[in-house]
Amino acid sequence: MPDDRRTQLQKLHREHDEALAFAAQIASLAAEGSDASLAEGVRLVREYYDRELEAHLQLEEQRLFGPLIRYDKSHFSLCMRLGNEHGKLRSIATSIEQATAPDDLRAFAQILNDHTVVEEQEFLPLVASLFTPEELDAVLDFSPLPTRPASVATGR
């Protein structure tokens, strides 16, 4: 794979590394289970969603899924699976509250971890091998749509 392709996808790889570390941190807070650790987990998930996750999900959905499916319809099921997981992550991040924190934090951490592993092992290698330089440049030029912050969506 040419160096420019690695450069064009480097931001996604870095975000995936951060996502795996974040999932482990959230799983640890959920396992600890004190009111303080659960509150911290809720706060961190909301901040992560607002700061990084939503933009990352939009980039994949708007710049990567369509072209990958156009290359080969057999990639549709992978993109649908990843899109479904995006919806689950959004749903948890925008509705999480203290009362549901133990289950929501565990679910969020597990989904984020498993999802990120699939993207790193299956999805991004396909993108790197199939996309044209112009399609990869579109990854760098992406600007996400504005959304309501998770803290606003939950009223917190």
Image: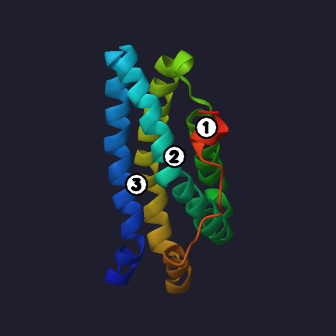
Q: Is residue 40 above or below residue 82?
A: above
Write the residue at 34% across / 60% down. 14
* Residue pointed to by mark 2: 49
Let me know if residue 115 appears in the view: no
Of the image marks 2 and 1, the number of the one nearer the N terminus = 2
- The mark lying in front, picked from 3 and 1, is 1
Q: Position of residue 71 (x, y in %)?
A: 63, 71
Q: Is residue 38 above or below residue 83?
A: above
Q: Position of residue 56 (x, y in %)?
A: 52, 58
Write the residue at 49% across / 57% down. 123
Residues marked 3 and 1 touching at CB (< 8 Å) = no
* Residue pointed to by mark 1: 94
Question: Residue 23 occupies which quadrant of the picture?
Answer: top left
- The mark lying in front, picked from 3 and 2, is 2
Q: Which is more toward the observer, 51 or 10?
A: 51
What type is the residue that disc 3 sits on? Glu
Crowd tier of the residue under label 2, counting other residues whose Cα lies within 10 Å: few below 14, some 14–19, many 20 or above = many
Q: Name the image quarter holding the N terminus.
A: bottom left
Let me know if residue 81 appears in the view: yes
Question: Residue 37 occupies which quadrant of the picture?
Answer: top left
Crowd tier of the residue under label 1, counting other residues whose Cα lies within 10 Å: few below 14, some 14–19, many 20 or above = many
Distance CA(mark 2)–CA(mark 1): 8 Å
Question: Residue 58 occupies which quadrant of the picture?
Answer: bottom right
Q: Is residue 27 left or right of residue 74?
A: left
Of the image marks 3 and 1, the number of the one nearer the N terminus = 1
* SS at mark 1 in the image: helix
Q: Which mark is residue 120?
A: 3
What type is the residue that disc 2 sits on? Tyr
Residues marked 2 and 1 touching at CB (< 8 Å) = yes
Distance CA(mark 3)–CA(mark 1): 25 Å
Q: Which mark is residue 102?
A: none
